[in-house]
């Protein structure tokens, strides 16, 4: 008999049972995919590094600096070294790599050629398979280079150097644990052993270097020994620093983790709401059963059985949907790294699905336990004991001028704040999840980010690898000065009054007391140090003054006024620290020298773009930039945002992709929740709708009543979401900028976009969906009035 | 006399489990302005269906229901809603009200929604309070609907049905859920409203209630089997006599 009651109940309350089933499917999908992703992403980098067999400490020495065997001697004698490997590499500029169409390869940095078969690490192809063999003439390149040059597997590249030519066919893009992060300037090219030999045989060995990988017993002590030794290296970093180069991937991962956590919260709120709602629907039935003498235990068993059946079906379906849903998110992160399935794999999804069943059962058990305390009459009265100790709502229809329908909506919300509060939580989370990534993306795309790279503001950025490489020589400083004079004169003659400047980069070891640290050094020519932003102190003016980033200062324990020693080339010199600044360049590491200091540009490791700042107030800067393009056809001429966009191109693409997927998912969730909520309310309020119809309310008025409630809830959520989004952006994405070296970031907020466009988009789409769902009201008959409780 | 409601060949059919159930079969009758007509008949005879069908609360399968010169079948949803809002009042056997509103708010809700008058919200509230005062329930104006007795609530439902000064009130067993005292009070109010000029059509099982009406329609198996005019019997001064006469007639009808 009880099974017959359940069968009948499932049929009779079809709409409500289907809604509950859909919510259980949603909750299982969100929880199972999110928990799996949480575990996968949080262990992704260590797993990837292990899979790539990345050493504890990696450094590169340049042949041109001379290697007298001191490095090998140190590594062999140091008792903290467990094992070490060395591989050859060759630095090649994009100028020396030609594409099929004759154009040079766009690199925006230096290219490094190595064999696929090096001891330092393993490489993987785009399908995450280890590259274990390569034929002659084949090449693997980074995805960034492929995207930047619109290359595809099968396309040809030719290495050209002083008459030597070597043609390659692109096999695929590779995943490179050491240099694969978008923030890593150097891009690796992987070739066959024999091809690499041909390259080293034919290209000036000064462009070559050695790549060392060290496994240690004690990394910290090894690093101390290494720094004390003062070996000449271009780059030296441990796994932790390499991890930080993946910070943007991790920002995306962190954003997805936040999304996952929010989806879990949304799921619990939805589940609690729906189960309470559906159980309340059953009160009258329970009361009748109690009245005819069926025992509480039996009644509870009946409902628990029904909810168990629904939750098993819902969780099973949710489990199957959770797999592609979770993968969709993971694919966004895994463009640069390999994310292995979490330890438990899909078993995690199974566990989560079972967890959802248990949660539903617990909710159901606690709700029905309340019912068993009711007398049959109270149960029949839907749990209302007829007692009230405080007034419901505070609005009175007779005392307000609010239109009747709006009054009904507001009164409903005020009369059931907990029920509608659940909706506010869901929609608020949705709004925050949309605004936070947009603020991050806008900040990453903004011109102002130049100052975060510790660059002086300018109007035009010009790049020419060949010219810039010439500056990296012993007489580089004078070459830059001549270059700047020529360019300023030429521009002036062409009606452009502008100042031209350029910045060189170095790798120097800085020492203060017992602490030593290898840091990026920067010196501008043609630009005064007061053109840069400092968080504390004064710009370094005299040759013996420097400014340090707060990360470099913290590493060695120095502060303003201290005297530090910096090894610039073969000799060390003392400098006074006059200022502290922040930079997201090179993971926040940096030393800024006065433009008056005489540094040897032979040791320069790189050069920023040549910068042009207009001195007059020109109306049409776009036209001037076009003019400069015509005057300097060999240069890649860009605006500030184009230059930053290129520096962070992969990052912005990733953030943009993530933004799109989040906006899409959130809008879909909002729409789905709104539709289901409206349908739930209509099912629950059929009798009230019938009563309103019988008293002469038009369908349009009743539909407005239904959707106005969702509209009010959405507006409240939007206000809350907008108010909370910025502090949450600061907490989440701000943390990522902090890892990159910025102590404080002012997020760029485009009010029209984040306060108007996206909220309006969400509001409009959700309201349209709610209206469509509310059209169901038309089918409710006045006869439903008789079902009023 | 002016016709308020004219029913011509009215049929109502429900399909239950693919079987046609003819609840009303070619029903014809007229109600004039100021009348108070009771519909009586055995259970399942189609009394309530008749009430809801003629008032446009339920669809008409065939025939016509002309209310105040308007054929209800020809009206669209909005016109029908406006008719119910401004010209009709409904009282149900159960005291249906919106649970999140106070008793007074429930009463004035149709008036606030009506576009008929140009009254302010305050004036509507005063009118609602006057009605409540008239029906002796002013003290429950700010109460929740769960905090008042059935009799009080049914009188509140009468107030709601009256709030827009309808041309006609349809009442489906308005005293069915009440005890005798409450039932007498409610009927006294309905008679008072009728005497003030409002036409009333009510469905009842109670001879005592029907005896207070001016006319009784007796329905059996979806057909009006007979009609009894109580105005010929005498005024309500001799109520027991009216009840006796009505009872005798009903017995003849097979009651």
Image: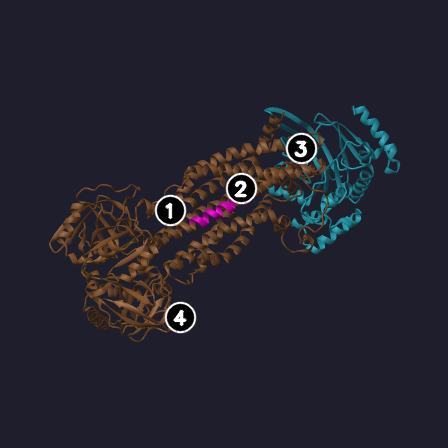
Q: Are marks 4 and 2 in contact (CB under 8 Å)?
A: no
Q: Which quarter of the rendered picture does the C terminus of chain B lie within?
A: top right
Tag 1–tag 3 contact (CB < 8 Å)? no
- Mark nearer the N terminus (1 vs 3): 1
From the top left corner, tell me how far across and down residue A645 is, in percent. 33, 58
Identify the residue at horizontal 27%, vertical 47% (top origin).
A121
Mark 2 to mark 3 CA distance (whole Å):
31 Å
Q: Quadrant of residue A547?
A: bottom left
Rendered hue of chain A is brown
Which residue carries the number 3 mark? A296
Above/below status of A287 relative to A711: above
Residue A676: which disc? Answer: 2
Q: For mark 4, give the secondary structure.
A: strand
Q: Earlier in the sequence, mark 1 or mark 2?
A: 1
* Callout 3 secondary element: helix
Crowding at dot 2, Cα within 10 Å, few <14 / some 14-19 / many 20+, comes out as many
In magenta, the rendered stretch is A256-269
- Return the chain for callout 2: A
Dot 4 and dot 2 within a common chain = yes
Q: Does dot 1 land on a helix, a strand or a loop?
A: helix
Q: In the rendered image, which residue does mark 4 sit on?
A: A536
Q: Which numbered disc, 1 or 3, marks the residue closer to the eye? A: 1
B184 or A637: which is nearer to us?
Answer: A637
Instruction: Look at the numbered disc 2 and give the secondary structure of its residue.
Output: helix
**Mark in the foreground, 1 or 2:** 1
Q: Is residue B33 above or below residue B133?
A: above
Q: Which residue is mark 1?
A: A44
């Amino acid at each position: 008999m009880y099974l017959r009651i359940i069968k009948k109940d499932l049929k009779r309350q079809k709409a409500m049972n289907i809604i509950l089933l859909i919510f259980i499917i949603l909750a299982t999908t969100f929880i199972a995919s999110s928990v799996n992703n949480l575990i996968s992403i949080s262990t992704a980098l260590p797993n990837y590094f292990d899979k790539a067999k990345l050493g504890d400490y990696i450094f590169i020495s340049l042949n041109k600096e001379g290697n007298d065997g001191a490095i090998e001697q140190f590594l062999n004698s140091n008792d903290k070294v467990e094992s070490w490997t060395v591989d050859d590499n060759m630095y090649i500029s994009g100028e020396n790599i030609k594409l099929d169409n004759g154009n040079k390869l766009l690199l925006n940095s230096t290219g490094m050629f190595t064999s696929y078969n090096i001891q330092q690490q393993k490489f993987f192809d785009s399908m995450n398979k280890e590259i274990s063999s390569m034929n002659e003439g084949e090449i693997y390149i980074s995805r960034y280079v492929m995207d930047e040059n619109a290359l595809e597997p099968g396309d040809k590249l030719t290495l050209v150097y002083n008459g030597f030519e070597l043609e390659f066919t692109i096999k695929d893009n590779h995943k490179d644990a050491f240099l694969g992060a978008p923030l890593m300037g150097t891009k690796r090219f992987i070739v066959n052993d024999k091809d690499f030999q041909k390259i080293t045989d034919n290209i000036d060995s000064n462009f070559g270097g050695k790549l060392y990988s060290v496994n240690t017993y004690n990394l910290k002590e090894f690093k101390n020994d290494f720094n004390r030794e003062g070996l000449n290296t271009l780059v030296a970093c441990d796994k932790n620093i390499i991890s930080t180069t993946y910070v943007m991937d991790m920002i995306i991962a962190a954003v997805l983790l936040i999304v996952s956590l929010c989806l879990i919260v949304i799921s619990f709120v939805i589940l609690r709401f729906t189960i309470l709602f559906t159980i309340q629907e059953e009160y009258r039935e329970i009361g009748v059963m109690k009245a005819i003498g069926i025992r509480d235990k039996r009644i509870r068993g009946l409902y628990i059985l029904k909810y168990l059946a629904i939750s098993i079906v819902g969780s099973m379906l949710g489990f199957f949907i959770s797999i592609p849903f979770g993968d969709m998110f993971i694919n966004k992160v895994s463009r640069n790294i390999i994310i292995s399935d979490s330890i438990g794999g899909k078993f995690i999804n199974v566990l989560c699905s079972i967890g959802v069943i248990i949660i539903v059962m617990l909710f159901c058990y606690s709700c029905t336990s309340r019912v068993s305390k009711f007398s049959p009459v109270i149960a029949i009265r839907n749990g209302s004991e007829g007692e009230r100790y405080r007034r419901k709502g505070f609005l009175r229809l007779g005392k307000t001028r609010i239109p009747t329908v709006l009054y009904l909506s507001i009164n409903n919300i005020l009369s059931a704040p907990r029920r509608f509060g659940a909706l506010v939580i869901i929609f608020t989370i949705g709004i925050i999840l949309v605004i936070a990534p947009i603020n991050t993306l806008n900040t990453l795309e903004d011109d102002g980010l130049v100052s975060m790279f510790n660059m002086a503001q300018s109007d035009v950025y010009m790049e020419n690898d060949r010219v810039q490489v010439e500056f990296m020589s012993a007489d580089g400083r004078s070459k830059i000065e001549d270059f700047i004079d020529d360019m300023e004169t030429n521009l002036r003659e062409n009606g452009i009054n502008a100042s031209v400047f350029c910045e060189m980069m170095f790798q120097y070891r800085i020492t203060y007391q017992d602490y030593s640290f290898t840091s990026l050094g920067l010196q501008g020519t043609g630009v005064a140090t007061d053109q840069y932003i400092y968080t504390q102190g004064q710009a370094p003016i005299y040759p013996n003054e420097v400014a340090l980033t707060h990360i470099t200062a913290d590493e060695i324990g120095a502060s303003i006024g201290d005297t530090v020693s910096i090894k610039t080339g073969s000799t060390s010199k003392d400098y006074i620290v006059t200022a502290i600044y922040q930079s997201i360049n090179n993971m926040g590491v940096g030393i800024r020298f006065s433009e008056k200091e005489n540094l040897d540009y032979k040791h320069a490791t790189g050069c920023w773009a040549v910068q042009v700042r207009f001195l007059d107030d020109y109306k049409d800067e776009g036209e001037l930039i076009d003019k400069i393009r015509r005057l300097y056809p060999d240069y890649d001429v860009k605006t500030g945002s184009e230059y930053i966009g290129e520096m962070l191109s992969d990052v912005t693409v990733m953030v943009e992709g993530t933004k799109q997927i989040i906006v899409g998912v959130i809008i879909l969730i909002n729409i789905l929740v709104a539709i289901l909520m409206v349908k739930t309310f209509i099912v629950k309020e059929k009798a009230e709708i019938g009563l309103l119809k019988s008293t002469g309310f038009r369908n349009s008025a009743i539909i407005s009543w239904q959707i106005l409630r969702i509209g009010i809830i959405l507006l409240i959520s939007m206000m809350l979401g907008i108010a909370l989004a910025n502090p949450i952006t600061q907490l989440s994405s701000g943390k990522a900028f902090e890892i990159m070296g910025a102590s404080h970031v002012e997020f760029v907020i485009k009010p029209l976009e984040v306060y108007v466009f996206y909220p309006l988009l969400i509001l409009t789409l959700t309201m349209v969906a709610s209206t469509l769902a509310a059209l169901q009201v038309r089918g409710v008959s006045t006869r439903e009035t008789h079902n009023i409780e | 006399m002016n016709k308020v409601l004219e029913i011509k060949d009215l049929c109502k059919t429900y399909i239950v489990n693919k079987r046609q159930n003819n609840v009303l079969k070619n029903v014809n009758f007229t109600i004039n302005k100021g009348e108070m007509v009771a519909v009586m008949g055995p259970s399942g005879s189609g009394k309530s269906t008749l009430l809801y069908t003629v008032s446009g609360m339920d669809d008409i399968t065939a025939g016509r229901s002309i209310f105040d010169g308007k054929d209800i079948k020809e009206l669209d949803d909005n016109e029908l809603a406006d008719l119910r809002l401004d010209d009709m009042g409904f009282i149900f056997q159960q005291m249906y009200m919106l649970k999140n509103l106070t008793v007074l708010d429930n009463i004035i809700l149709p008036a606030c929604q009506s576009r008929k008058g140009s009254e302010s919200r305050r004036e509507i509230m005063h009118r609602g309070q006057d009605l409540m005062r008239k029906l002796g329930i002013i003290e429950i104006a700010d109460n929740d609907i769960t905090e008042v007795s059935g009799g009080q609530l049914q009188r509140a439902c009468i107030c709601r049905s009256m709030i827009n000064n309808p041309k006609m009130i349809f009442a489906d067993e308005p005293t069915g859920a009440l005890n005798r005292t409450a039932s007498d009070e409610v009927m006294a109010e309905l008679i008072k409203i009728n005497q003030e000029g409002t036409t009333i059509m009510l469905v009842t099982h109670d001879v005592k209630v029907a005896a207070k009406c001016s006319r009784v329609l007796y329905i059996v198996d979806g057909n009006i089997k007979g009609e009894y005019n109580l105005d010929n019997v005498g005024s309500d001064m001799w109520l027991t006599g009216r009840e006796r006469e009505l009872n005798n007639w009903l017995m003849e009808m097979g009651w």
